[in-house]
Image: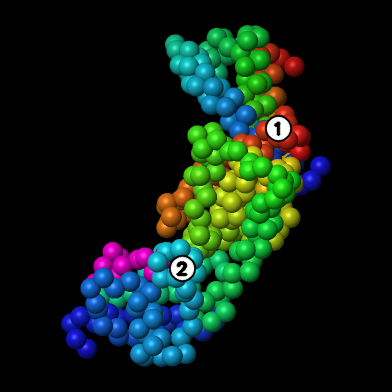
Amino acid sequence: MSNTDLKVKVWRGSQEGEFVEYLVPRNPNQTVLDVVTYIQRKLDPTLSYRFACRVGMCGSCAMTVDGVARWTCRTHVSQILQGDSLEIAPLNNLPVIKDLATDMREFFNKWKGAVGFFKGNQTRHDDFAKVEPHSVERQLANAGIECIGCGVCYASCEVVESRPNYLGPAALNRAWTLTNDVRDIQQLERMYAVAGDAGCHACHTQGSCTERCPKAIEPTASIAGLKKLVAKAAVRGSKWGKL
Amino acid sequence: MSTGVLQAKLWYAQRISAMVLGLCVAIHLLIIFYAIRGGLSAQEILGRTQGNVLLAIFYEVFILACFVHAPIGVANILQETFPKSSLARPLSFILALLILVLGTTAVIGVFTGGQI
């Protein structure tokens, strides 16, 4: 082994499995995804992992690196390396399919569960909706709109760990951006979906999602917005009606 | 009412009662300074607090805020710590009852000086 080799422990198996150590040459500007790709191409072609764009747009390469969920394509080894070893595992809070690939179905089903999808009442024959860029709603939606669905927040959330039916930060953040979309017509349904302990009111405001979001989104703030909006709608009513 | 909406209402009640509690605790600290001046025996303290309607009303408000606030929080903690048990609801109901009954008894006790 040369002095510049990295000792990389990688999770092999599914829910049950073990860490296997590989030696990977250290390169300048090397990302964690480069490390995993090197192992798969040069050392062990049976290693399974997921990636697509390699430039931080698609949200498919998130893994747990040294105990912290990160997007691996934009995480340079030099940013996080302590000593000469790395530990790479699949994301927490999701079932492992094989090695570093997790089953994301529940994660995305919860987006649906939070009514995290747009529905309008205009057609292509109508004029464009005019949304003032500086309006409060547009600004609030902007703050959370850049989510790439990588699952880092979901894997970092301790409430997801203790309440498996909790919708999680990504789904609730999406619900919040849609709550501020003046064209959307599902506001009451969405508030019903995100109310209570399976939704926004279970959040502990611990802020791990905000701390770790690679896109610097603040799901904690989005969830706080939902909490206030939905609780007021339940007690006093909202501009869309009472829950 | 759906469970989610009920939980949202409870969350709201807990926040409002927390605001009341914040004020009550601050006033309570001031009352302590007043009540302990010139002797710490029960008789001396009762001498300054007994029969005061305002004090009785204030502490009953304090108890009502605790009665709303604490059981909701305890129920949440129990639900998250022991997700498979169904203890959260009955235990928090018992706690709510204890806070209301024992607290109100104490307020009446101080107000009347234990004469009833």
Q: Is residue A28 visible?
A: yes
In the rendered structure, the answer to whether residue A207 lies left or right of residue B61 reads: left
As displayed, is residue A71 above or below residue A21? above
In the rendered image, residues at marks 1 and 2 fall on the same chain: yes
Question: Which residue is the site of mark 1?
Answer: A238
Q: Amino acid at mark 2?
A: Ala
Mark seen at residue A62 = 2
Residue name at image x 19 percent, y 86 percent: A2
> Foreground residue, B76 or A196?
A196
Q: Is residue A77 magenta?
A: yes
**Nearer the N terminus, badge 1 or badge 2?**
2
Residue at x 39% of width, y 81% of height: A37
Count residues near mark 2 (Cα–Cα under 10 Å), then give few for <14, some for 14-19, many for 20+.
many
Q: Amino acid at mark 1?
A: Ser
**Image position of A67 with respect to A27: above or below:** above
Quarter of the image for the N terminus of chain A: give it: bottom left
Quadrant of the drawing holding the C terminus of chain A: top right
Label 2: element kind: strand
In the rendered structure, which segment of residues is drawn in magenta? A70-83
> Where B90 sits versus B16, above or below?
below
Q: Is residue B62 magenta?
A: no
* Host chain of mark 2: A
The quadrant where residue B38 appears: top left
Depth order, front residue of A34/B60: A34
Query: Which secondary structure, mark 1?
Result: loop
